[in-house]
């Protein structure tokens, strides 16, 4: 990744925390690397070295600063300055468990492992293995700092196979032991809860400001599936299932903070990193509002929308399969109608929570194996859509169709559209919400056409494709701005 030296120096000297996570600065005199906004004395420009990723700084021999905690900064936007292939590889690494081999990663991307390593050396400055290791180590540091989990539990929750390897990795990165890193005032991970046999784990999800919490939580509230999701103000709760365990996860936001607070009653395990990653995807925490706004406000149509909703996020989805089913349910019906159908589906086929939850949370969304054989006529679903859901569920359950986008939007749309009942709109909507594809664009969406017509802009597909080219690579955010510009209309509309 190319970094403009003069611009980075100015960002460091300004101590502007909005640049946190966009790049890192290594100081050659101290061998420490920091994020923009660090309160430590400013180094001389001649002693600064700039890196796009923390792993690159660590590979160059720098260790994380103990004051600004660069590992606690928001994640680097994977589209920022990298090739399309590297961007997809980075998303795979940060969305995975940190154990996928370079060979397996390259195969998923459709290229050779040697070529992938060359691309990473050119665009990232660190190997895929270094990024995986840094990702696990920095997550472990967060657990040490924000929870009172025992060190052994931290090691396994962060994806390490043994405590010894965990200790070695922490010492190599931070030059201290795990217990030496832990603050005496660490937030307890085990506050009193309603039942003595449950533990509530709480963590922070860092994000970049501005953050339009009102739009995001309102979007999720309007579409919350009864029994599975609930929204109260700036708090979103939902049922989750992982490694055969069912529980509840809540994400909340307090105005003025630069993080979301996540809590779950599931006992920490090797899947904790995946749970945190999924929650972050729902709230689009890795988005870079400055970069997105710089592109979209060039269009006179979008400029006032961007100004009206700074920090607008693309609402994500907890599970790609769940999102695909909900997208099919929402074809040709209103948002309210789709929500009603989803609630019926969950009540009829979902897995009940062992003891139920607060806010009406009662079921986990049904798994592919269940819906593959379900009689969906019981919930009043039209025959064609019922068949589409069953076919999708069978394809996912048997492994015939993988709900992932390692080779980009076009490949994902092609694979989804091979299934009956799924067209380009559904595929792009799933890409937009389930995979966080920043350039996903459901060009045939009724809401888009209405927003453009309200602004007096041609709304046919050809004109929209031509105009949207200037919005790339952030067409998903342009879509949200256009949707948000509409007052909630009465009557039927395609579900978004």
Image (cartoon, rainbow, N blue to C red):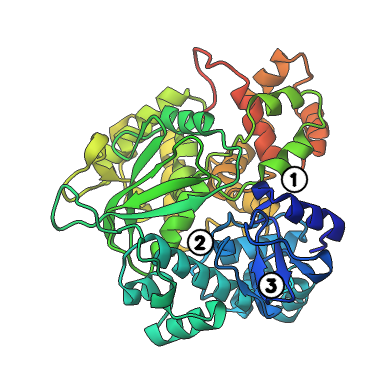
| Alpha carbons under labels 2 and 3: distance apart | 40 Å
**Could you tell me which quadrant the C terminus lies in?**
top right
Residue 404 is left or right of residue 374, and the answer is right
Of badges 2 and 1, the one in the foreground is 1
Seen in the image, is 209 located left or right of residue 302? left
Mark 1 or 3: the one toward you: 3
First along the sequence among labels 1 and 3: 3
Spatial CA distance of label 2 from label 1 is 30 Å
Question: Which residue was labeled with disc 3?
Answer: 57
Question: Which residue occupies the foreground of this view, 32 or 138?
Answer: 32
- What label does residue 473 carry, if any? 1
At mark 3, the secondary structure is: helix
Q: Is residue 207 above or below residue 494?
A: below
Residue drawn at x 58%, y 67% is 93
Q: Is residue 287 visible?
A: yes
Name the image quarter holding residue 397.
Answer: bottom left
| Sequence-earlier tag: 2 or 1 | 2
Q: Position of residue 491 (x, y in %)?
A: 49, 13
Q: Position of residue 238 (x, y in %)?
A: 34, 43
The residue located at (60%, 57%) in the rendering is: 75
Pick the front one: 407 or 60: 60
Q: Which residue is mark 2?
A: 400
Residue for point 49% across, 79% down: 170
Viewer can see residue 395: no
């Amino acid at each position: 990744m190319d970094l403009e030296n003069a611009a980075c120096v100015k960002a460091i000297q300004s101590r502007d925390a909005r640049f946190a996570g966009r790049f890192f600065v290594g100081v050659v005199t101290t061998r420490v690397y920091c994020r923009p906004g660090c309160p430590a004395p400013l180094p001389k420009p001649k002693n600064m070295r700039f890196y796009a990723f923390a792993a690159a700084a660590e590979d160059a021999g720098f260790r994380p600063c103990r004051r600004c905690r660069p590992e606690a900064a928001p994640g680097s936007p994977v589209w920022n300055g990298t090739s399309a292939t590297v961007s997809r590889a980075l998303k795979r690494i940060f969305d995975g468990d940190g154990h996928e081999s370079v060979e397996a990663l390259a195969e998923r991307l459709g290229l050779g492992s040697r070529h992938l390593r060359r691309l990473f050396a050119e665009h990232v400055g660190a190997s895929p293995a270094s990024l995986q290791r840094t990702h696990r180590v920095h997550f472990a540091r967060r657990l040490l700092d924000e929870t009172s989990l025992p060190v052994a539990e931290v090691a396994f929750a962060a994806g390490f196979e043994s405590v010894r390897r965990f200790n070695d990795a922490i010492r190599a990165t931070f030059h201290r032991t795990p217990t030496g890193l832990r603050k005496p005032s660490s937030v307890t991970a085990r506050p009193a809860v309603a039942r003595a046999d449950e533990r509530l784990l709480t963590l922070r999800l860092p994000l970049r400001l501005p953050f339009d919490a009102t739009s995001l939580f309102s979007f999720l509230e309007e579409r919350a599936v009864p029994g599975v999701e609930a929204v109260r103000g700036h708090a979103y709760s939902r049922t989750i299932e992982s490694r055969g365990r069912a529980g509840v996860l809540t994400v909340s936001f307090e105005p003025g903070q630069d993080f979301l607070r996540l809590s779950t009653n599931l006992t920490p395990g090797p899947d904790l990193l995946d749970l945190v990653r999924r929650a972050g995807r729902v709230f689009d925490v890795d988005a870079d509002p400055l970069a997105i706004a710089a592109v979209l406000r060039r269009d006179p149509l979008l400029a006032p929308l961007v100004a009206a909703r700074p920090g607008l996020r693309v609402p994500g989805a907890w599970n790609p399969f769940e999102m695909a089913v909900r997208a099919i349910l929402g074809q040709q019906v209103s948002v309210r109608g789709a929500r009603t159908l989803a609630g019926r589906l969950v009540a009829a086929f979902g897995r009940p929570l062992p003891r139920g939850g607060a806010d009406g949370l009662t079921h986990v969304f049904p798994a592919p194996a269940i819906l593959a054989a379900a009689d969906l006529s019981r919930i009043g679903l039209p025959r064609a859509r019922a068949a589409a859901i069953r076919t999708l569920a069978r394809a996912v359950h048997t492994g015939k169709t993988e709900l992932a986008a390692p080779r980009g939007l076009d490949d994902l749309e092609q694979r989804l559209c091979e299934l009956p009942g799924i067209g380009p709109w559904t595929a792009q909507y799933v890409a937009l919400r389930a995979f966080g594809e920043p350039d996903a664009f459901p060009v045939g969406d009724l809401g888009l056409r209405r927003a453009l017509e309200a602004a007096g802009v041609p709304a046919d597909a050809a004109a929209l494709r031509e105009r949207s080219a200037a919005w790339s690579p952030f067409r998903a955010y342009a879509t949200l701005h256009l949707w948000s510009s509409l007052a909630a209309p009465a009557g039927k509309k395609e579900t978004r």
